[in-house]
Amino acid sequence: MTAATLTAPLDVLKTRLQSDFYQAQLAQSRLAKGISPHTHLSAFRSGLLHFRETFQILGSVHRVEGWRALFKGLGPNLIGVVPARSINFFVVGNGKRIIADYGNNGKESAWVVLCAAALGGIVTSTATNPIWLIKTRLQLDKNVVVEKKGGAASRRYKNSWDCIKQVVRQEGIRGLYKGMSASYLGVTETTIQWVLYEQMKTALTKREERIVLSGRPETVWDKTVSWTGNIGAAGVAKLIAALGTYPHEVSLSF
């Protein structure tokens, strides 16, 4: 919950950058600067341009819609974080034990973790899909000028509850489960992350065992790895999984 709150503006920014509306806005901005869509920029200039455009949108959100707009969708996100993580850890933890007991003579291996992680991802996605849909809709909701209201800026959704009511009224209950197929594709990210994380933890444990068996005193590097090994493994596993499966995140924004 703490991480979700601190990184909420970046989450809003990511969702908007993935949407068609803001991609069109960026394309118009580039044309205004004389940059053709067919212009081939160097990797450095392309990265620099993307960096500038990213913070340009972040600044425009704050300037046009106010600082509260940077935290759009935070409510559903916070509501979804705890049950999503809890369900995932519960299913994966118990799944590993059950699959290992009945399918691998009680031994945990990579394929056992893979199956348990896939199951955990499917259960979590099914249970929490409406939450993420509402969060995404709120993040993409932009202030528009309504002539009937004297030119005052207005949003489509007042809050999370209003968004739920409008989705159910206009699209039915099934509307809350839009993007489910893409969400299921996203199970691959969770699966890869879990498998890599467990393998890294196993490698770290074996490393510590070798140090103990060797009888040599721990060096500064050994202590550093001991203290930061798990968090480093978690970060690297998430990074690799996210890079490998990022396209499915884009599909969830439409």
Image (cartoon, rainbow, N blue to C red):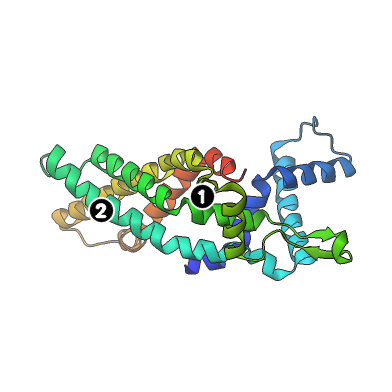
97 to 228, vertically: above or below: above
Asked if the residue at tag 2 contacts the one at tag 1, i.e. Cβ–Cβ closer than 8 Å, the answer is no
**Horizontal relation, residue 36 to residue 48: left or right:** right
The residue tagged 2 is 93
Disc on res. 226: none
Q: Give the number of the mark in front: 1 or 2.
A: 1
In the rendered image, residue 185, in percent from the top left (x then y), is placed at 46, 38
Instruction: Write down the quadrant of residue 111 in the picture.
Output: top left
Residue 32 pos. (x, y %): 89, 44
Q: Earlier in the sequence, mark 1 or mark 2?
A: 2
What amino acid type is highlighted by mark number 2?
Answer: Gly
Q: Residues within 10 Å of mark 1 (few under 14, many from 20)?
A: some
Q: 108 or 46: which is nearer to us?
A: 108
Q: Is residue 159 visible?
A: yes
Q: Residue furthest left?
A: 105
Residue 84 found in image quarter = bottom left
Q: Secondary structure at mark 1?
A: helix
* In the displayed structure image, the side of residue 185 where residue 54 appears, left or right: right
> Judging from the image, what secondary structure is the residue with disc 2 in?
helix
Left or right: where does residue 229 sit relative to residue 134?
left
Q: Is residue 107 visible?
A: no
Q: Residue at x 57, y 58 (%)?
A: 164
Where, quadrant-wise, is the C terminus in this rendering? top right
| Mark carried by residue 173 | 1
Q: Residue at x 88, y 60 (%)?
A: 147
Q: Residue at x 24, y 48 (%)?
A: 95
Residue 55: % across, % down: 72, 57
The amino acid on which the numbered mark 1 sits, given as a three-letter code, is Ile
Count residues near mark 2 (Cα–Cα under 10 Å), then give few for <14, some for 14-19, many for 20+.
some
